[in-house]
Image: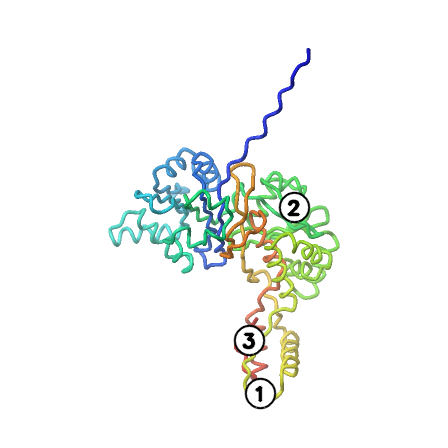
Amino acid sequence: MFRIKKRASPPAKMPTLYNIIEDYTESDAPGNVTVCAMTEAEDVEAHARVLSESYGIPLEVMTRLLHKGGLYIYPQDGPLVTRGLFACKIDPAGQEPKQTWVLDVVQYAEAEQLARSYGLGLEEAAARVFYRTLAPELLARLPEKHLGLDYAKLDRAIVRHGDIKYIDFRKDWSPHFKRLCIMPDGRLVETSGLDEFASLHGITAAEARTLIEQGGTLEVDGEVLACQIVNGQPSVARFNRRQYARAKEIAMTRGLHIMDALSEVGLSDPALMQALKRREQLKTALVFIFMLGVTACSGPKPILYPNAQYQAVGQEAAERDIADCQQMAETAGATPEKGKGAQVAGSTVAGAGIGAAGGAVGGAVVGAAGSGSAIGAAGGATMGLLRGLFRRPKPSDAYMGFVNRCLTERGYDPVGWK
């Protein structure tokens, strides 16, 4: 007799947490949130598990909040209040999607003061404090159906589930988001949890956690991992021995911080930039960021109003005068770079279909940064990774002031920098 082997059951599909992502991380803090929304029916168990782990709230408490709404006020650390609160807002009439957010310590204090001053409940006060920090564009879209998105342009897999069921306004880098690190040859390598990230780079989980929470650099067998915190979210890249040696040379000879020097290396390394360019056809998002990097290579310079002096000498002569003034500024010691405090504009585009376990990612990325375009699945801080680490920093105030004054004395009218 022949024994019939049973076909192995396919692995259970990981529940998907979000299928619409809107990026507002470039907004002023504390309104620099990522809007994570879902049109499918809520899997409360999975949703609660992820939010519980992300925000350090007991699972049973988070489950209750997602069912009934309300607040969770973080316990004090001795006599000190070190964390604010978590809020879950549920519309009793069911007209609005469920919404969750967090308030930091300062916002929590504002909510308490507002509640006392106007006789409001703390939940209402917390909502008012939170909403007034959001970008005006986002605030205007919240009352609109489907966040004002044109459902005719969205993926059918998203639209067929109907209205948005819940929105998480997130500012954290959840352990359930995919971590992507740009490698020395331009590859984007994806990992799920801290342990996998640490294993990839041959470091301990403690070192990995410190790196992504605090930013900075970490030497690994002669190479270096660099992490830039972009609006509270980590952007990570690895540089090989040659690239690292070049960055250290730049830092020493030009007096730059090592992070700025690594950015210079990233922008000027042919292999890295060619690797990014080859991905243009695969990822629309990378085309956008790559073009930012290429545009940035020339560095910011002043914009001149076409006054009488400009009209008299012409564009070519004006460009020579700009270059001359920039050289004079550097000779005088007003270096262009801002150093460690270089302003990194974090346009982190998180990927949709962020899973509820093991960093599972599936589905299309839709509405990233309000574009309404479908981009390949990408989680965590991929865009901030590229934009944060490989772009020219904004010039220092001293440098811009010197160049502006030099140009003014030559009869020009500088109106800004680009």
Given contact means CB atoms under 8 Å apart, are the residues at marks 2 and 1 in contact?
A: no
Identity of the residue drawn at 59% across and 77% down = 403
Above or below, 157 relative to 347: above
User: Badge 1: how crowded within 10 Å, few (<14), some, or many (20+)?
Assistant: some
Sequence-earlier tag: 2 or 3: 2
Sequence-earlier tag: 1 or 3: 1
Which mark is in front, 2 or 3? Answer: 2
Above or below, 210 relative to 276: above
Residue indicated by mark 3 = 401
Above or below, 289 relative to 56: below
Given contact means CB atoms under 8 Å apart, are the residues at marks 1 and 3 in contact?
A: no
Residue 189's disc is 2
Identity of the residue drawn at 58% across and 75% down = 302
Q: Position of residue 72 (x, y in %)?
A: 37, 41
Question: Does residue 301 appear left or right of residue 118 in this picture?
Answer: right
Picture colour scheme: rainbow
Callout 2, which amino acid?
A: Val
Callout 1, which amino acid?
A: Gln
Sequence-earlier tag: 2 or 1: 2
Q: Nearer the viewer, residue 134 or 245?
A: 134
Q: Nearer the viewer, residue 397 or 119?
A: 119
Q: Report how far apart the C-alphas of labels 2 and 1 lie in the structure.
A: 52 Å
Residue 309's disc is 1
